């Protein structure tokens, strides 16, 4: 019943799409490194998990969203976050992930340096709010944090990168020199899609960043197929697209250690791939807490966030914005009509 009600709220919201901004809390600017790397071949593209033997804490940038993984139980139970207005998605994402992140930090001992929620894009999907969490942690603690977040938020994958001289991937930062155009979600999406059209290797995804107060994009060679000969081409494409958009940008490329951990929800509907990693490292207690306590908590947080933030958005709309009274809305179920007929009911 609750799931049906949430989907009806989402249907009403879809009729009043709007684009919001960015929430940030203590974003620490990254240093920009200019120039082209000297490596002549792709870095160790097969290593997508950091070596577990590393025990010295270092800085990791972890990126993930709340839009649920394909075929995950939550993707069937809750409204499609891709279909919601960006600002509503942002509010729901932040409310839920703040609590999941708190659990992950407490269980792993990782130290949070910064956390912001910014637009992230993947393939043909519209940009959605993405958590950009910067932590100081050992490699094993960073992996545990990624598994906790991926399991509780039912993500297909969670990615992390750490800047280093000896990594397994390259990454690119594109930062606007002046102005704030790339802080706009629609402009950012159009800019990135144009980059991908001219240079497909700059797909499949990006993260929005802010460097010294300037907006930009962060792109990792997640497929491991960038070569040294590609970087001059990337630079030319970035310059061309920047000119098309009337922007002046800086281009930086550097080496990172890249990690990607996930779960195939179609094969493992209960997130066993995430859970087995805890069992394999002897953390059976943590696995039990995830299954018996934190999973139930996360489900409640998600349900509450959809009800609170979606309803709050509907209540905030002015009479002129009540386009849910359109023909499309009137032909929906009687339940939806009752739900949206009286704003006080929400």
Image: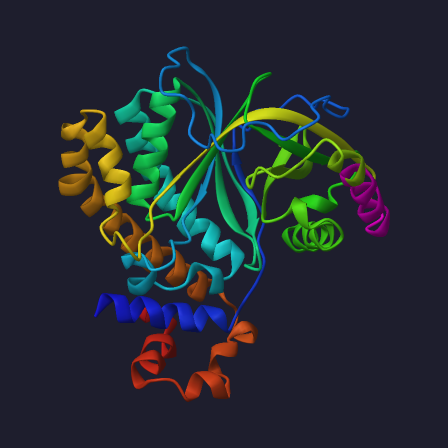
Magenta segment: does it hold 272?
no
> x, y (%) of residue 260?
44, 37
Residue in view at x 42 percent, y 40 percent: 158
Q: Is residue 29 visible from the viewing direction of this image?
A: no
Q: Nearer the viewer, residue 18 or 97?
A: 97
> x, y (%) of residue 17?
54, 66
> x, y (%) of residue 337?
35, 82
- Image height of 213 relative to 297, above or below: above
Q: Quadrant of residue 27?
A: top right
> x, y (%) of residue 293?
16, 40
Q: For the N terminus, which image quadrant?
A: bottom left
Residue in view at x 23 percent, y 38 percent: 275
For residue 119, side relative to residue 172 (left or right): left
For residue 74, side relative to residue 159 (left or right): left
Q: Nearer the viewer, residue 172 or 113?
A: 172
For residue 43, side relative to residue 129 (left or right): right
Q: Quadrant of residue 100?
A: top left
**Magenta-drawn segment:** 234-246
Q: Nearer the viewer, residue 132 or 219?
A: 219
- Image height of 77 relative to 147, above or below: below
Q: Is the stretch drawn in magenta largely helix, strand or loop?
A: helix
Q: For the C terminus, which image quadrant?
A: bottom left
- Image height of 259 relative to 304, above or below: above
């Amino acid at each position: 019943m609750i799931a049906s009600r949430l989907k009806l709220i989402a249907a009403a919201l879809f009729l009043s799409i709007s684009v919001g901004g960015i929430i940030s809390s203590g974003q620490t600017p990254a240093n920009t490194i200019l120039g082209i790397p000297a490596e002549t071949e792709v870095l160790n593209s097969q290593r997508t998990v950091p070596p577990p033997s590393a025990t010295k804490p270092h800085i990791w940038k972890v990126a993930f969203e709340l839009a649920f993984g394909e075929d995950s139980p939550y993707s069937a139970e809750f409204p499609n976050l891709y279909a919601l207005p960006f600002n509503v998605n942002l509010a729901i994402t932040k409310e839920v992930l703040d609590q999941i992140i708190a659990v992950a930090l407490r269980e792993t001992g990782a130290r949070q340096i910064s956390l912001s929620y910014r637009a992230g894009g993947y393939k043909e999907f519209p940009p959605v709010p993405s958590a950009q969490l910067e932590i100081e942690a050992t490699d094993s603690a960073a992996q545990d944090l990624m598994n906790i977040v991926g399991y509780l938020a039912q993500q297909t994958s969670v990615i992390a990168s750490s800047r280093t001289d000896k990594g397994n991937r390259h990454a690119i930062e594109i930062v606007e020199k002046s102005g704030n155009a790339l802080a706009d979600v629609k402009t950012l999406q159009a800019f990135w899609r144009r980059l991908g059209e001219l240079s497909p290797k700059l797909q499949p995804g990006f993260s929005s960043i802010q460097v010294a107060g300037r907006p930009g994009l962060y792109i990792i060679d997640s497929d491991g197929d960038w070569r040294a000969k590609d970087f001059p081409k990337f630079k030319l494409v970035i310059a061309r697209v920047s000119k098309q958009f009337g922007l002046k940008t800086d281009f930086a490329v550097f080496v990172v250690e890249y990690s990607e951990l996930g779960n195939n929800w179609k094969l493992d509907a209960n997130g066993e791939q995430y859970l087995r990693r805890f069992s394999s490292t002897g953390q059976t207690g943590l696995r039990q807490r995830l299954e018996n306590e934190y999973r139930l908590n996360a489900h409640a947080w998600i349900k509450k966030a959809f009800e609170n933030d979606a309803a709050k958005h509907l209540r905030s709309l002015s009479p002129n914005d009540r386009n849910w009274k359109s023909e499309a809305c009137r032909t929906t179920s009687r339940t939806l009509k009752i739900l949206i007929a009286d704003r006080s009911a929400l």
